[in-house]
Amino acid sequence: MCVLSVVVSEAEVTIRRASEDDLEGLLRVAAASLGWVDGEPHEALFRWKHMESPFGPSPLWLAECNGEIAGYRAFMRWELRDQWGSPVTAVRAVDTATHPDFQRRGVFSRLTTHGVEEMLAEGINVVFNTPNDQSRPGYLKMGWRDIGRLPVAFRATQPLAVVRMFRARTPAEKWSEPTEVGVGANEVTTCAGMSTLLASRPQPVGWSTAMSGKWLQWRFGLEPLHYRAWVPQSADDGVVFFRLRRRGGATECSVGLVLAPESNPDVERQLLDGLAKAVDADYLLRMGPPDPRGGFLPVPRVGPRLTAREITATPDCDIKRWAFSLADIELF
Ligand SMILES: CC(C)(COP(=O)(O)OP(=O)(O)OC[C@H]1O[C@@H](n2cnc3c(N)ncnc32)[C@H](O)[C@@H]1OP(=O)(O)O)[C@@H](O)C(=O)NCCC(=O)NCCS
């Protein structure tokens, strides 16, 4: 195990790899810095992200000072394909927190630099994330590049919904609202038609997640998130994974992923059309460029900013060549 000592304002801070035994303390620090509300399923979400991912468990590091956890850093493992379909090994710099008593003393920077060094030794290609405004300046100081804003587009389900959407200019709730529309996502990700559908799709035209049946089962399988699947026919004829969440006074249908046979855009439009008519939400929100033919208009200045850093390979710095869907970004 690699242990590193650094001095933060006279007190010695030790950096070490975390294990499952550290989970309770680590979640206490996260709760103190992120203002988590009691009773929400944060631990289940943390375990899902960092211990149950099909890309493998996340490396996690702790900074300790006099036996207390001053901060932690997680790098979630992820597999990408570049625009030619070649594999790219990645980590996502998601989940980091410094206890309020230790903030602005270099804990986050040292944990992150330490993590990048360990990933370099492992031969990981790139690190990427969509940091918030508080942590983005820190990443840019450590060599991350601001690649740009990932586009998002919306489709209103009724005229008044547009007003509600533009009034609701606040971040969406993290947790989902229940709905009976569609079927539970698990019913679809585990069915036989999924592998036929996935196999029919051509390689996306940009950097994208290396998707598999196992990945779909994990991504849409966490019970507290209540993901649903819109499947008008059988799974191999196409499916939309979605969930509902509140954004201010509006109910948003967050379109995680649309899978159409051979990625046929007309079938994608038909699937989304059916969902828009059936769903009990004010609008559909998806990641990607606008599609006026399918009723999807741009939402300016709303998409998250993607940042990335080279570890052993250079990430693509053209935002137009990143082909992420909401399922790749939301919650991470
Ligand atoms: C964001 C956070 C992890 C930073 O931790 P930290 O240990 O205080 O960060 P560092 O001392 O290493 O700061 C490194 C750089 O990050 C940036 N930064 C850190 N806190 C910042 C803040 N509140 N506002 C703006 N920039 C900030 C600065 O550029 C800073 O460099 P500087 O101090 O030389 O200006 C910490 O404030 C935190 O836990 N926040 C709540 C949880 C969170 O937002 N996590 C990130 C998303 S998951």
Image: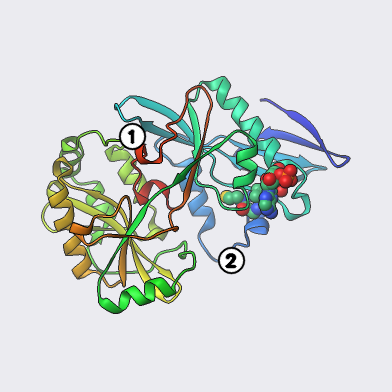
Q: Residue 56's spot in the image, x, y percent?
A: 45, 34
Dot 2: what SS? loop
In which quadrant of the rendered image does the N terminus lie? top right
Residue 210, which numbered label?
A: 1
In the rendered image, the vertical position of residue 313 relative to residue 217, given as above or below:
above
Q: Earlier in the sequence, mark 2 or mark 1?
A: 2
Q: Judge whether residue 25 can be spotted in this image.
A: no
Residue 37, which numbered label?
A: 2
- Give the residue type at disc 1: Ala
**Quarter of the view holding residue 8:** top right
Q: Residue at x 21, y 39 (%)?
A: 198
Give 233 or 131, whichever is nearer the viewer.
131
Q: Residue at x 47, y 65 (%)?
A: 173
**Quarter of the view holding residue 231:** bottom left
How far apart are the alpha carbons under marks 2 and 1?
Answer: 34 Å
In the rendered image, the vertical position of residue 188 relative to residue 203, given as above or below:
below
Q: Judge whether residue 252 can be spotted in this image.
A: yes
Q: Nearer the viewer, mark 2 or mark 1?
A: 1
Would you call the spot at circle 2 few (<14 residues within 10 Å), some (14-19), or many (20 or more)?
few
- Left-right relation of 166 to 280: right
Give 57 or 230, whichever is nearer the viewer.
230
Q: Residue 237's spot in the image, x, y percent?
A: 12, 49
- Left-right relation of 118 to 81: right
